[in-house]
Image: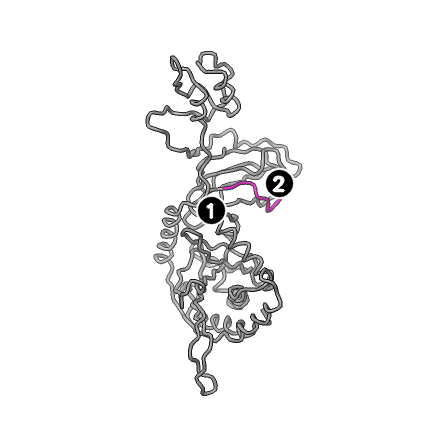
Amino acid sequence: MGIFTMPSLGADMEDGILVEWLKAQGDTVARGDIVAVVETEKGAIEIEIFEDGKIDEILVPEGSKVPVGSPLATILGAGETVVSEIAQHTIQVEAEAPAAPEAAPEIITSRPIMDDVSEVRASPAARLFAKDHNIDLNGIRGTGPSGAIQLCDVENAKPAPPKRGIDLDAMRHAIASAMSRSNREIPHYYLTHRIDVSGAQNWLDAHNAARSPPERILFGALLVKAAALAIRDYPEFNGLYEQGSFRTSQEVHAGIAIAIRGGGLVAPAIQNADQLSLAELMVQMRDLIGRVRRGSFRASELTSSTMTVNSLGDRGVEGVLPIIYPPQVAIIGFGKIIEQPWVIEDEIVPRPILQMTLAADHRVSDGHRGGLLLNAIAEKLDAPESL
């Protein structure tokens, strides 16, 4: 018997609203299936399941506000027929409902319609609507003659679905909390390095020349791939610092900082970024950016990053000093490519120059290793054909 719980979708997340179940009680599920949608400060997030089996019992109704770690459903494995004991206990959840007008009565929707409502004065249309929408007439104040419940009274009592989308104020609060924690708990150090990227640009121009726009690779994909490849040789920058110790990761899951339309920022991960070809990486980046801009992404994309890349070049920023997102220990920032004078063989010539920055955790690494990492990224970008 497995228990499907409310996942933690960020270092500062305490609870979330279960907006929608995408699987029903009795449905068979497999590892990686999307089973529910949860609303957090970051928006509506699709929640995957990480075991095979069958949904034995759904424990939390849609619209409920649930603390991280609380049981949402029980999962039966192959051959299991045991009925969940968790269902015998009450799970405290806070249902989020729209504010009612001041004069409106309290609306009760948590119990099924009573079989005997003969004492309730209501029109036939009101009774039919209440039955179809599982609304208890006993909790509604009627506006008809002698207080009889009319159809409009029941329609007004129907709970509105939870608001979908992104609460920007809440997101700003969540970002501020996470960054405050990062500044308070992580001893940051910063290194910057400027490099000539003319070789990478020339290679990319030639690569894209014979391809249609959907097949072309953007320079940002080269930055992510170069960083992901380089960090494999410097594992102290790739992993998580939790409960007083650092655990390096054998995989490189690159978080990509993405601005959400209207405001806000998230950094969902591209899994095994170092193993993808540039074309595969570009496809995944386009998909991820598109879904994030629509406010739709998955739980695993928010929780699996082992390092983060933040590129603000397309915003016209020459350099960035990023803040580490806990429990990660490193973030690499890239600025705008700018034509600048550069000395080559005793001559001053114009060259496209890129500034990159490493913010790292001094509990795990030092400036010597950080400098080597930045130089390794520069070497990867200087040989783009090998990415």
Residue 363, percent across and down?
41, 63
Residue 36 magenta-highlighted: yes
Q: What element carries label 1?
A: loop
User: Badge 2 is on which residue?
Assistant: 29
The amino acid beneath tag 1 is Ser
Q: Specify start and end residues of the magenta stretch as a single range.
A: 28-37
- Against 136, is 376 above or below? below
Residue 292 or residue 379, whichever sits in front? 292
Residue 38 or residue 328, whichever sits in front? 38
Residue 310 or residue 206, whichever sits in front? 206
Residue 249 magenta-highlighted: no
Residue 386, percent across and down?
59, 71
| Disc 1 packing (10 Å; few <14; some 14–19; many ≥20) | some
Residue at the outermost right position: 79
| Disc 2 packing (10 Å; few <14; some 14–19; many ≥20) | many
**Number of residue marks:** 2
Residue at 54% x, 31% y: name it. Answer: 85
Residue at 37% x, 47% y: name it. Answer: 169
Quarter of the image for residue 323 reads: bottom left
Quadrant where the image shows the C terminus: bottom right
Quarter of the image for residue 335 reads: bottom left
Indicate which disc, 2 or 1, sits on the residue closer to the N terminus: 1
Q: How far apart are marks 2 and 1 (CA)?
A: 21 Å
The amino acid beneath tag 2 is Val
Q: What element carries label 2?
A: strand
Quarter of the image for residue 160 reads: top left
| Secondary structure mainly formed by the magenta segment | strand
- Asked if labels 1 and 2 touch by Cβ distance under 8 angstroms, the answer is no
Residue 8, disc: 1
